[in-house]
Image (spheres, helix red, strand yellow):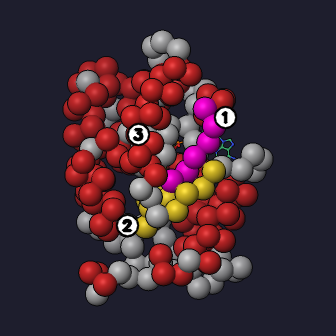
Amino acid sequence: MTQSRKYPELKTTRPVVLVGMMGVGKTTIGRRLAPHLGLPFFDADQEIEKAAGMSVSDLFKTHGEASFREGEARVIKRLLDGPPHVLATGGGALTNAETRALIAEKTLSIWIEADIETIIKRAGRRDTRPLLQNGDPRETLKRLLKEREDYYRAADIHVHTQPGPHNKTVEVILEKLDSSPWLLSPREEDK
Ligand SMILES: Nc1ncnc2c1ncn2[C@@H]1O[C@H](COP(=O)(O)OP(=O)(O)OP(=O)(O)O)[C@@H](O)[C@H]1O
Ligand SMILES: O=C(O)C1=C[C@@H](O)[C@@H](O)[C@H](O)C1
Ligand SMILES: [Mg+2]
């Protein structure tokens, strides 16, 4: 798809990064948002799988979470060092301090939020989310959210996902960007 017809002026030189809990819809929304901004889309989890030659679940099983987090930080740094794009991060990406600093410094970040009950419904395919494979997913999500909420909250834009079609959430993001054009322009330090 080419640039959005409704918002033809929405162009940014900064990468646009989606953050938030697993299952809120970052990958789904990011993929749909990118063409409206005329940017390519990348998904950090998929890039890690490509680089490692194995699934996220197998990476957790074989090498452990700490090693997955190192790979995740490397992949995100590589992408953010490249040309502008829309990037859907994995739910735990902001637990890495270097990734948090990079995202704060270089990107326009969007926190996608959803209620825990909605996340549980959406995160049904538990094989790609190894952290939900053991124990009560509701308790795990609550604990992780408590640990991560402050990191997500630091994002430039905050969107609570809309029930119904994914495009509704994309539309809300586009409206927010359209009404906050300074978020799209280069910051002083980029010039
Ligand atoms: N309104 C909605 N917005 C976004 N996603 C939705 C919506 N309704 C249902 N979904 C579904 O929720 C599921 C989870 O979405 P997705 O995989 O994009 O989440 P994610 O945030 O990328 O998760 P992770 O951090 O684990 O990668 C998908 O199957 C998607 O189709
Ligand atoms: O929230 C998390 O910690 C995770 C989310 C997923 O995107 C994957 O990156 C992985 O399952 C870990
Ligand atoms: Mg995803």
Q: Is residue 189 magenta?
A: no
N-term-proximal mark, 3 vs 1: 1
State the SS at label 3: helix
Disc 3 versus disc 1: distance between alpha carbons? 18 Å
Question: What is the number of the mark on residue 148?
Answer: 3
Q: Is residue 172 above or below residue 12?
A: above
Disc 1 versus disc 2: distance between alpha carbons? 27 Å
- Tell me where residue 129 appears, x and y as whole percent: 46, 28
Residue lying farthest to the top in this orientation: 135
**Amino acid type of the residue tagged 2 in the rendering:** Thr
Q: Identify the magenta region.
A: 111-116
Disc 2 designates what residue? 107
Residue pictured at 26% horizontal, 57% vertical: 101
Mark 3 CB lies closer than 8 A to ligand 2? yes
- For the residue pair 161 and 50, the one nearer the viewer reads as 161
Residue pictured at 45% horizontal, 26% vertical: 143
Disc 2 versus disc 3: distance between alpha carbons? 19 Å
Disc 1 designates what residue? 118
State the SS at label 1: helix
